[in-house]
Amino acid sequence: MKKNNSKSIHVLIACGGTGGHLFPGIAVAEVLSARGHDVTLLISEKKIDSIAASGHKDLRFEKMPFLAMPKPWSPKMIGFLSGLWKGMKQCRKIIKDHEVDVVLGMGGFTSFAPLYAGRKEGCRTMIHESNAIPGKANKLNAKYSDIVLCGLEACKEHFSKHGDVRVVGTPIRSNMRQNSKEDAHAFFKLDPKKKTLLIMGGSQGARGVNRVVGMTLEQFERMGIQVLHIAGPTDYEEVRDVYAKHPLLPQHVAAFCHRMDLAYRAADLAIARSGASSMSELAYFGVPSLLVPYPFAAEDHQTRNAEIFDKAGAAKLLVEKDLNADILADTVRSILTNNKNAEAMKRAANKVAARNAAEKIADLVVKEGK
Ligand SMILES: CC(=O)N[C@H]1[C@@H](OP(=O)(O)OP(=O)(O)OC[C@H]2O[C@@H](n3ccc(=O)[nH]c3=O)[C@H](O)[C@@H]2O)O[C@H](CO)[C@@H](O)[C@@H]1O
């Protein structure tokens, strides 16, 4: 795009497909918009994208079809290439219509068409990789990006061939204010005198975590704790029915939570997948966690993410295939009944938290766009 001499710049943030791309993208958009810049968020037609966008009516969203890359010789390749071509055309139109100066991709293959189109239209381009190791898509995206931004220091070495790589952290949304624990308990109708265990499986829930937790409810009940369980839209009904069999266990079960700030605030301990945004938020709120990596994540990146927090003392890594109700109950008990353990983990979590990642990215975007 042409050199922008006015104060305000135009930014396209590609962040569709999964909460781990959407919410950090929204976080950067919030900072840029608050500073008076023009931002368009490019999301996909997936349900999670609409759920995420519905909580941010003040931001501008454009949709494009979700594209997953098939195996090289798959018959799906023809449809994929045609979808990709249409996606690029659509992106070039958006870039021209909004006179975009900078394209920022938050990761995954959904960022490819916007970055490629951005390059063709003369925009500055950047990608953000929040995981400890990049997937194939972001390695490709890096080739079309002037700057590569990493959420974690460990990721930097994987982009060693790229000339401009910076570690900035993974942004969290501005509505993640530090509310009081009392507000948080009141919001979920939980007992302020009891220890709260938060269960969450990333933006779409985690079946493996839901199931093992379901088998541990009786032991949680005996510990005298309460549980806040965000089950994900797919498993919600099944999870709710399992909890219904334990009416004496204080509980709040939800399919999706629009107030994750309050969920983290209420929590004394979390059991979670090790998605990068979830981890970034757990650290920000200083919540000790038991991280159960999704075993089929690309390049096993969730294990690499969890290892960083485990090593720092902020979390304990639990391998899903080795996990059962007794191990889970013992681990939860060892933290929730030992204040010293919990406090040490809390301090370690705070220590690994990224500081002002959204602001740092916004600063760079604006500098590039001028
Ligand atoms: C299976 C898989 O490959 N998952 C990947 C995906 O995870 P996923 O999309 O699950 O993303 P994360 O765990 O990183 O983040 C989840 C986000 O959703 C929000 N949230 C979640 C539940 C809810 O009810 N409400 C809500 O707002 C959380 O606050 C957080 O901001 O993208 C991440 C970022 O690349 C990766 O690290 C994960 O490995």
Image (cartoon, rainbow, N blue to C red):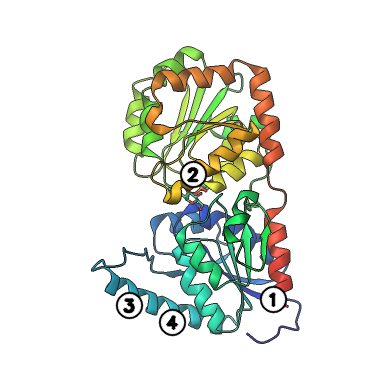
Asked whether mark 2 lies closer than 8 Å to ligand 1, one says yes
Decide which of 184, 100 is in the foreground and name it.
Answer: 100
Q: Is residue 354 above or below residue 134?
A: above
Judging by the rendered image, the residue that carries numbered circle 4 is 89
* Amino acid type for the residue under numbered disc 4: Lys
Label 3 and label 1: CA atoms lie apart by 31 Å
* Amino acid type for the residue under numbered disc 1: Gly
- For image coordinates 60% across by 27% down, the residue present is 268
* Amino acid type for the residue under numbered disc 2: Gln
Q: Earlier in the sequence, mark 4 or mark 2?
A: 4
- Residue furthest to the left: 75
Q: Quadrant of residue 127?
A: bottom right
* Amino acid type for the residue under numbered disc 3: Ser
Decide which of 339, 153 is in the foreground and name it.
Answer: 153
Q: Secondary structure at mark 4?
A: helix
**Image location (x, y in percent) of residue 325:** 40, 21
Q: Which mark is residue 82?
A: 3
Q: Secondary structure at mark 1?
A: helix
Please identify, in this view, whether the residue under mark 3 or under mark 2 is nearer the observer.
Answer: 2
Label 1 and label 2: CA atoms lie apart by 33 Å
Q: Residues within 10 Å of mark 3 (few under 14, many from 20)?
A: few
**Image location (x, y in percent) of residue 67:** 37, 66
Judging by the rendered image, the residue that carries numbered circle 2 is 302
Q: Which mark is residue 369?
A: 1
